[in-house]
Amino acid sequence: MTITPPALSVFETLESEVRSYCRSWPAVFDRAQGSHMYDEDGHTYLDFFAGAGSLNYGHNNPVLKRALIDYIERDGVTHGLDMATTAKRAFLETFQNVILRPRDLPYKVMFPGPTGTNAVESALKLARKVKGRESVVSFTNAFHGMSLGSLAVTGNAFKRAGAGVPLVHGTPMPFDNYFDGQVPDFLWFERLLEDQGSGLNKPAAVIVETVQGEGGINVARAEWLRALQDLCHRQDMLLIVDDIQMGCGRTGAFFSFEEAGIQPDIVTLSKSISGYGLPMSLCLFKPELDVWEPGEHNGTFRGNNPAFVTAAAALNAYWADGQMEKQTLARGEMVERALLAIADENAGAGVSFRGRGLVWGIEFTDKNRATAVCRRAFELGMLLETSGPESEVVKLLPALTISADELDEGLRTLARAVRETA
Amino acid sequence: MTITPPALSVFETLESEVRSYCRSWPAVFDRAQGSHMYDEDGHTYLDFFAGAGSLNYGHNNPVLKRALIDYIERDGVTHGLDMATTAKRAFLETFQNVILRPRDLPYKVMFPGPTGTNAVESALKLARKVKGRESVVSFTNAFHGMSLGSLAVTGNAFKRAGAGVPLVHGTPMPFDNYFDGQVPDFLWFERLLEDQGSGLNKPAAVIVETVQGEGGINVARAEWLRALQDLCHRQDMLLIVDDIQMGCGRTGAFFSFEEAGIQPDIVTLSKSISGYGLPMSLCLFKPELDVWEPGEHNGTFRGNNPAFVTAAAALNAYWADGQMEKQTLARGEMVERALLAIADENAGAGVSFRGRGLVWGIEFTDKNRATAVCRRAFELGMLLETSGPESEVVKLLPALTISADELDEGLRTLARAVRETA
Amino acid sequence: MTITPPALSVFETLESEVRSYCRSWPAVFDRAQGSHMYDEDGHTYLDFFAGAGSLNYGHNNPVLKRALIDYIERDGVTHGLDMATTAKRAFLETFQNVILRPRDLPYKVMFPGPTGTNAVESALKLARKVKGRESVVSFTNAFHGMSLGSLAVTGNAFKRAGAGVPLVHGTPMPFDNYFDGQVPDFLWFERLLEDQGSGLNKPAAVIVETVQGEGGINVARAEWLRALQDLCHRQDMLLIVDDIQMGCGRTGAFFSFEEAGIQPDIVTLSKSISGYGLPMSLCLFKPELDVWEPGEHNGTFRGNNPAFVTAAAALNAYWADGQMEKQTLARGEMVERALLAIADENAGAGVSFRGRGLVWGIEFTDKNRATAVCRRAFELGMLLETSGPESEVVKLLPALTISADELDEGLRTLARAVRETA
Amino acid sequence: MTITPPALSVFETLESEVRSYCRSWPAVFDRAQGSHMYDEDGHTYLDFFAGAGSLNYGHNNPVLKRALIDYIERDGVTHGLDMATTAKRAFLETFQNVILRPRDLPYKVMFPGPTGTNAVESALKLARKVKGRESVVSFTNAFHGMSLGSLAVTGNAFKRAGAGVPLVHGTPMPFDNYFDGQVPDFLWFERLLEDQGSGLNKPAAVIVETVQGEGGINVARAEWLRALQDLCHRQDMLLIVDDIQMGCGRTGAFFSFEEAGIQPDIVTLSKSISGYGLPMSLCLFKPELDVWEPGEHNGTFRGNNPAFVTAAAALNAYWADGQMEKQTLARGEMVERALLAIADENAGAGVSFRGRGLVWGIEFTDKNRATAVCRRAFELGMLLETSGPESEVVKLLPALTISADELDEGLRTLARAVRETA
């Protein structure tokens, strides 16, 4: 495939230097459907990034699209603040019936503003209010968002430096397997909590991702998550699972923590919850934590009703039975086999991989290799991104609705890109 | 009009106690068009709140609706992170040609995530990075958002208490007319800056709204804004105008600061920028301030392309000539006359009013009166909200596209609600 | 007087660059008695600085010296942590009988460590603990100390910059007469407290000096102090008077706030409390505020027993009757007359003065003049220092025990130094 | 020994509840000499606490006493701010000749105010200024002082809670042997520093005690200290050794870090530096770090000249040759043998001990036992204190000048107290 240099001029002259993905993928995208994006020059790209996990059901999923257009056509309420609307009610009832009840989850639902970082900010506020303490523990290589509260519990030094003020009230602890099994889980964390002379400010809460997507596809084991929940219970800390990227079926089950059998006190959802890539987020919490005063946290776009419509449609279409979960796990096995083959083929070149469901990472000992692989994949018509603190991991995040053929094609392109960057 | 108690059950049982507007307006809204909303029981409401300023062109504006449906129908990119897309290019070119160039504004454009508070967070980060200082000055009764960085420069004590951590690095100064002209403008602020013993941490920036919407419809005079800009220049502080609620034509001109003839260093826009009530926000700044590293601030929904489509359509439809501005000023004069009449009619009852363009506030000496007026207006089929630190001000925020008849009807209903709550 | 360049070598080579007074007064001092210091080259200096207010009874006061030597000779406890000792008991009983009871002051006494900043740190801790709030209000040009808590409520920008971390939880308010009577007292402060949208974090306490010594000899009027106390009572804030420099008789009465007839909730004392220049400090507070847990604040040198001995001796010698207060006020009148004459003599040259008791300041429109006056005074054999944010004020702080002749001599030298720097 | 209930009334009625040691030792002390204290009822106490390490040369050491009285008798300058004085020069020259030069230590000397916490505050300020970063790493169970800056790097939860504001900018790391050798030294700390996604704010400095006195007599191994110094060098962090309690010969050598062969960037000294229990402290640092501006940090009592006199006398008397170090190590071996015997005698009762030089701790599995032992020791006429986060360690801190007989007597009393509290 030959790619003509795209006409990026207005992006280069008018848009801020802060832009990033458009630098890795120098194309002007126009249309998208399912697992494919199309640029204005007629090139097609197989999307293994899926809006950083916001497009679990693919681009412009036809089922949701129908519901969305119908709603817009009939002049359904678009902007609803936190007014009661029929669209919001339909979403709430669907969420309760399809997601919460079958899983015996007792959560109350808060609409904290339509972005992930808003959900995290509201979760942190609530935990601090409930416990009357400021401190929150996060984990190495965590990513929770760019506003000041979320950034303080995010690990990446480059993002943190952007704050312009010292980030305080957060303390990092080692994520699962941070020391390759060399150190017992929670040895450090628990000892600090038990020792009245440790100097750790007693935390209101712990915030964790079950799989760290931005941090390098680091997968927490189920037993580690259960031990973390136990520690939280013993030490009177709330457990917040940030399921923004890993929830909505990315790892198989709807919530990524289901496999571990835990029940977090607070859960954040965003990215794929609307199903169509529309801004929406939720903060879920146990009813006894619902100590908010009316309006104590708010946000102009917390009632993005078109997103409620596609969200309800997605839940009904994909989660009324267990098919989606099964398919994701099956697709995940395809990925695992392909990555094993790639690792075998590149034995000696320092290639390793890990993942769950449809989120996988390939790490290279040569830290620049991951970027090279993604660049080559782009030339081959495929969208792939890196993650990890030094962009040393190639991240696979295809739509859950990807077909077996598309997945196979992408994995073959990946293998080729790895081979050709050796 | 008789209103049957609505079936609010799932809102009451499942949604968090944090919900607020649905308590003032106990109806389940279903459809909306222009300046009217319709509940599921067939009642019609004249909307004088306009999504807290997010619906300057009315609900589901047909021009924008057409463009939006066309875009969705043709599978235009929905979720684009910060990739280059044809929809984003069209927006950028339109914004440049219709808004920036005719006003000789040299701004670079950043998409910081689709909510107002994200725009404010990015503005504060940038100012701190540019100046290498942490402190920011805000004003009494300012409102800038609910995430931790924005909340620290927001005045409302109830909202601030929700933070759960001490809010620092912000210092409030008196907004225009805070002392009814009793004290020279900026006497306190300038003295603190000049006195090396004052104890004020030297600010990186000053953040200001030209009209404080949430704070009680407090209107800054043009000369005050100019003097503030001069002070910022003399004292090496950046001037940030938060135009999230007052921009996009609310006060007449596209930017609310145009009338004063100032050119802020950084401007935030959100609410009505998409035109259709879809989540979108912008952070604008002078090119010499564009010191961001690629990806130093990001956000999953910063490329909400359907919003770019409606935003471009709105700019083309309403801002290619000066009609919208003229009409808003004319409608504003209608409002002013009506409020004058209300004040006259209630002479002796402590009624005052103020405003600009199509944002107005009526204040009552009896602080509970404003809530009573809004409640009565709702019974009369009209959506009106209060603002101010003690909800003591009735806030008028109709769509800019409201017809003269609708406006007249609303003002008459308002007059009746005032009369009937005496 | 001719001054040979002193042998400063070890000071220059070994002592840190942070040293300061030794730069203004390039002499190596050896002995001191009453209001005179003697350098090793045989020069005599009339001391109008008195250890920055630590030597109210003059250098090596013979009455205290006798008690001190007796105590050391008989092997009285020197270092007592916070053990009960006979010396501490004698001090406590004397302080109660001579100072607290005759003034009807109900204070509990805390020994917080022997320096002023330790007393301030303990006062701030206690206020925050009692009120459960972090914020404290201080005043423009306040000086409370160099450790992190005290520095956050100190005004001087140069000192603040030394912190190396952003100084937070303190907000400055205008000290008395900050606007030359142009603005009603407490207009800004009270409005911020009353306005629920002001953005001011509700303060636990207000900390104030009745005369700002380091800040430029700014004298608060008695009615201003009373109004401040009223404001604190109305707004549920504790009133802390930092009497470290102005207490122990500097302004006439033992406590500088007695004249105003107020009763602060918390009072800090240090500098002249030991009487002999030995490190000692006290934190006094109303009994209902004594919510400390045993050992919650401590300090190695809080039981500096030789200081307790000289402190008790000073109280018995100078405060058992009202002579000291009368004499100080009389001496103050002498100073005032002299300064009036200097101002008259320099009419047109921008000379003003202010003070109370035996603390006075002369300010020059030409801000460099004060330093020049002090330098000239040193050449003339007199120790004088500047104060104020730009060292623009000559500060007169003679021992309270200075004789009328010595005072007269010093004032004549001062007049000459002013004259000779015109 | 029978102890009559002492007359504590004025302590109970007038002194604050914050008092602590006087509760453990209900006696009113009057005189003291060498290793003995005498109460007003004629009881004698063998002092194994030595002013919490401030009396390394015993109470009222006759050599220093002579120098002190002579200085006072001849009216030497008592209070000297930071003026050059003959007493300060004598101290500086002695410190240079007796301490710094023979050890090839290039330090500049700062007088930061006469208490330990002032020295720590100045050390932290300087490190932050030099490196331009806010964060400082401290260790579990560290104790550095009670003012806000020092408290933030102190471990004890009870002391920290007294701050009344969240303590930030400090992060605790595991002290040597925190995990009984189970985890490689610095595994966690180094990994956080190397991982750009760890979330640790890059520290300006690390502050450490070589033996944690308040924290439970935790002894760092020489190789651990060397590895810490290496880590600081590799990671561009300053190494601050807080030698306030362990310096001045407590562990044998003058500086406690000499044995490890390291050269910290900054060292704090206080407690025994004056030798006589008089308030004095020093902050030492490498010359290239001396970036202070004149007066950037100050303090009223930083020129406590009587302390300079006794300090110089102590250095000349005890450190001009190596006798003191040898004797301390020999005495330490006596203590070690006695503790071994106590541990043997109580085998099975969970008794362990550790220490260096003349600082030792005995820990009991039964955490209340340590307090019981100290109480019984007091009844037997001996002053002993506990340390550790739960007061679970009996701390032995006799004067370095204790005679072999006195030491033997104390160790026998200790053994008896242990026996009698079984």
Image (cartoon, coloured by chain):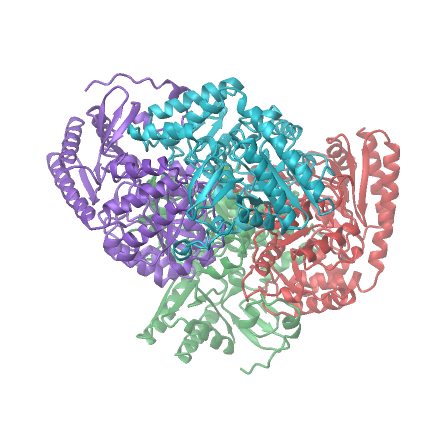
Chain colours: A purple, B cyan, C red, D green
The one nearer the camera, D126 or B154, is B154
Residue C344 position (above or below residue C231) = above
Residue B75 position (above or below residue C220) = above
Res C351 → quadrant: top right
Position in image of residue C210 (x %, y %): 74, 50
Horizontal relation, residue A267 to residue D299: left or right = left
| Residue under the image location 48 percent in, 31 percent down | B57
Horizontal relation, residue D81 to residue A80: left or right = right
Position in image of residue B388 (x %, y %): 60, 45
Residue D348 position (above or below residue D279) = below
Position in image of residue C367 (x %, y %): 73, 31
Res D196 → quadrant: top left
Q: For residue D113, say whether it is visible.
A: no
The one nearer the camera, A221 or A193, is A221
What is the number of callouts on the image? 0
The one nearer the camera, B228 or B401, is B401
| Residue at the outermost front position | B1
The one nearer the camera, D107 or D212, is D212
Q: For residue B229, say whether it is visible.
A: yes
Position in image of residue C361 (x %, y %): 78, 41
Horizontal relation, residue A120 to residue C34: left or right = left
